[in-house]
Amino acid sequence: MFSIGDMSRRSRVKVPTIRYYEQMGLIGAPERSEGNQRRYEQADLERLMFIRHGRDLGLTIDAIRELLDLSGHPDRPCENADRIAAAHLSSVREKIASLRKLEAELERIATHCQGSTVSDCYVIRALARHELCADEHERID
Amino acid sequence: MFSIGDMSRRSRVKVPTIRYYEQMGLIGAPERSEGNQRRYEQADLERLMFIRHGRDLGLTIDAIRELLDLSGHPDRPCENADRIAAAHLSSVREKIASLRKLEAELERIATHCQGSTVSDCYVIRALARHELCADEHERID
DNA sequence: CTTGAACCTCTAGTCGCTAGAGATTGTAGG
DNA sequence: CCTACAATCTCTAGCGACTAGAGGTTCAAG
């Protein structure tokens, strides 16, 4: 039996986050000690580590939830799992592409500035006048 | 004089976001029409476009606030502006680096799966058993 | 003068946690 | 057995940067 602290140390998921996952229904409510403290089993730990790996890979809670559901049904086809992974991969790739544009733009702006006062500052001028931008940048989060 | 809708169309910042920026103190409270609707001037639009460019570049509201303050003092040295841009550039680069690791890992996982059922699914197995990961992935947001 | 789009304020929700208050429990040492 | 004190408990609120919706008012075209 693991305390929530044991679970945290073993999974590298913080204690309040574990409680949050319980609240979100990602992990079930475990048994309790006589004094009302959570007591987990090995299977709970494995589920938590699954979640942690998914989060490390940048999956959303909802995607992880779906993958957890799937993993409980070993006989079903795994198309959905593949689809989730592939969709996430392409969103990661899109994000990389936008960030690269951003990197180029920021590099241009940041290295272009040789002025010593704000009035000469290329950084400020680039923000104030869009003509100085190399191209339209789209919004990323 | 521009209505908030005009401002929105010209800056491509959504109407509620403009009101939000006002609330956050990024833009001042403009004059009002007799019927209490916001009425902006050219200078307000330019400030808003400045903000939009900063957000497009991924700057935080706080960074933009600082840059806006600076841009109101043309005689000051622009070190701070350069510092903000450089710091942001390196954070963008870090994010790219993490996303690239993620991309590699996800590609490996997603293309590795040839099983047809969940029990054979490499995606699920990779999440369940960390040994299948190529290396430790750190958490990104 | 009428219609309907645009505007107003206010509150609450998004995502994935994180922080803090204030109370209780578990555990190791004496 | 007692005492510390770390760990746990529940609950609420906050983060960043918006977004959505309710319910009401104003503006502008025809």
Image (cartoon, coloured by chain):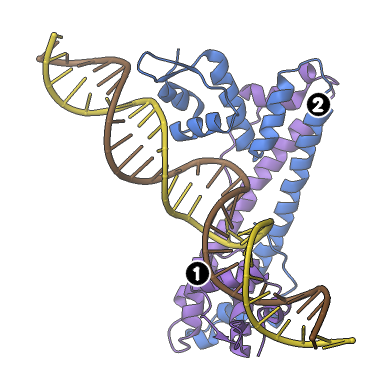
Chain colours: A blue, B purple, C brown, D yellow
- Compared across the picture, whether A113 is left or right of B10 comes to left
- The 10 Å Cα crowd at callout 1, few under 14, some 14 to 19, many 20 or more, is few
What is the x, y in percent for residue B10?
72, 80
Q: Amino acid at mark 1?
A: Met
Q: Secondary structure at mark 1?
A: loop
Figure check: B135 above or below C1? above
Q: Nearer the viewer, residue B132 or B38?
A: B38
Q: Which marked residue is nearer to the observer: mark 2 or mark 1? A: 1
Mark yes or no: residue A107 visible: no
What is the x, y in percent for residue A97?
74, 56
Tell me which residue sits at (64%, 41%) in the image: A58
CB under 8 Å between callouts 2 and 1?
no
Figure check: A11 above or below C5? above
Q: Quadrant of residue B120?
A: top right
Mark yes or no: residue B48 visible: yes
- Compared across the picture, whether D26 is left or right of B29 comes to right
Q: Quadrant of residue B30?
A: bottom right
**Rendered image: mark on residue B24:** 1
- Compared across the picture, whether A66 is left or right of C23 comes to right
Tell me which residue sits at (65%, 90%) in the image: B1
Q: Amino acid at mark 2?
A: Cys
Chain letter, disc 2 residue: B
Q: Which residue is mark 2?
A: B113
Looking at the image, tell me whether mark 2 or mark 1 is earlier in sequence order.
Answer: 1
What is the x, y in percent for residue B81?
50, 75
Tell me which residue sits at (67%, 32%) in the image: A64
